[in-house]
Amino acid sequence: MNSFLYDIIGLIAGVCFILSLKGLSHPRTARRGNLLGALGAGIATVIVFFRADEERASSSNLYWILGAIAFGVLVGVPAARKVQMTAMPQLVALFNGVGGGAAALVSIVEYMKLGASASTAEVIATVFTVVVGCVSFSGSIVTFLKLQELMTTRPVIFPGGRFVIAANLVAVLAVAGWVISALGTNPLLILAALSLLFGVLFVLPVGGADVPIVISLLNAFTGLTVAASGYVLQATLLIIAGTLVGASGTILTRLMAEAMGRSLFGTLFGAFTAKPQDSGGAAETRPVKSGTADDVAILLNYARRVVIVPGFGLAVAQAQHTVRELADLLSAKGIDVAYGIHPVAGRMPGHMNVLLAEANVPYEQLSEMDEVNPTFPQTDVALIIGANDVVNPAAKTTPGCPIYGMPILDVAQAGNVIFLKRSMRPGFAGIENELLFDPKTTLLFGDAKASLTKVVSALKAL
């Protein structure tokens, strides 16, 4: 394949990546955007084998490359197809970490190949890729462990932690300068080890509720490492793809931080300055008003407007189809129904939108937080299914708590509040929700899908 044709096909792949991001900006076009992104990645992978480069064409590593691709397909396809929607954030974290680690490894190998002939710009790009790629890899592994609850979801801090992190960062910068000035493989490997350690220390102080923001940030890091490795490898397509991922990840991180009502610095290091909070263990002994499916059905039946607030509990119970059936039944009775979607409901942005799209919920019924909040005073019933932190008034009333300052859905302004919960256990942020003890709140305990099925049956009987 001549160079001109190679560049043209590479440009087509780059355009696919751009159109993919555009498609992902709206639920109606998200599927098409995913397919375009996959097409672009497929083209980018295949054309490498036809590049007009004698050294690459005669490489004896061809079978290793094909074997690695086959292994990736055998692992990646089943993992992506079988993963539950509730575990999607963990999968994203793992895939993101692998991308950052791969970029760092490629840069190390290319650096060893170039040796003393590497230009200063190439060495700087290599150092940047190794540092950020290793941070992304080890940090993503920690986010996976937190989301999978293989380790505590609470911030992990220790005496002098901030000074240890600062010292680690200084060491990374010092060794990076050593690599740039003195060259050599050993300093680069030391730099990689220090960067891996920094990735772990970087994520440990982050609480579980803020982990999605860190995933987005690490995703942006991975994009930047891919772009930098593209410079080292003189691969324009890698620069395009990495820049797109880095830019979009940075924008998403900023938007998520705003949705949580805090600065990015506060999200990452706020645990070191936060005051100890009362766990609220005694709160569970306070009385709450629980009800039956029949009680909930009666409240819904005589409502004029109902806002459904989905959360992670709905995803765990796979109750999206049942909640759509309930909404359809209410609409058939002339009741105005809407879904109140918080920007960080679930554990990733768009989590609830995708889940409800699986059940063919009309997009017109999905209302973002800023759109639905003004309507709660005119809402007769707010039906909260598995959500907790995104409706917790502590975000407004309890300074120093993990979610303080986060904009929430103002369900407390509705005439009646119904909580579908498995138990009185706090949400992912680990703090009590005072709304559970409000006199106008009714709790329906049990699995969300089973509870909704009972409510639907009771509603049909009225």
Image: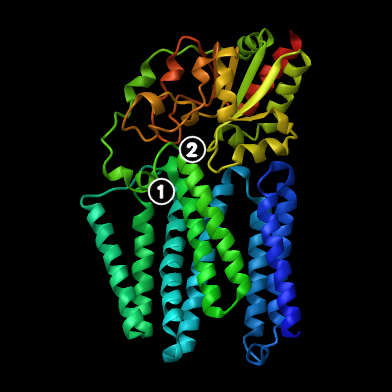
**What residue is drawn where x is 40% and y is 39%?**
262
Left or right, 330 with respect to 120, comes to right
Number of marks in the image?
A: 2
Give the quarter of the figure containing the C terminus.
top right
Looking at the image, residue 397 lies above or below residue 131: above
Q: Amino acid at mark 2?
A: Ala
What is the image's colouring? rainbow
For the point 65% across and 8% down, the residue is 298
Residue 257 point in image, percent of width and height: 45, 43
Q: Residue at x 30, y 79 (%)?
A: 178
Q: Is residue 147 something one can see in this rendering?
A: no
Question: Of callouts 1 and 2, which one flags the residue occurring earlier in the amino acid sequence?
Answer: 1
Q: Quadrant of the N terminus?
A: bottom right
Q: Is residue 9 above or below residue 76?
A: below
* Dot 1 amino acid type: Met
Q: Which residue is mark 2?
A: 259
Residue 233, picture quadrant: bottom right
Q: Which mark is residue 151?
A: 1
**Image-quadrant location for residue 295:** top right
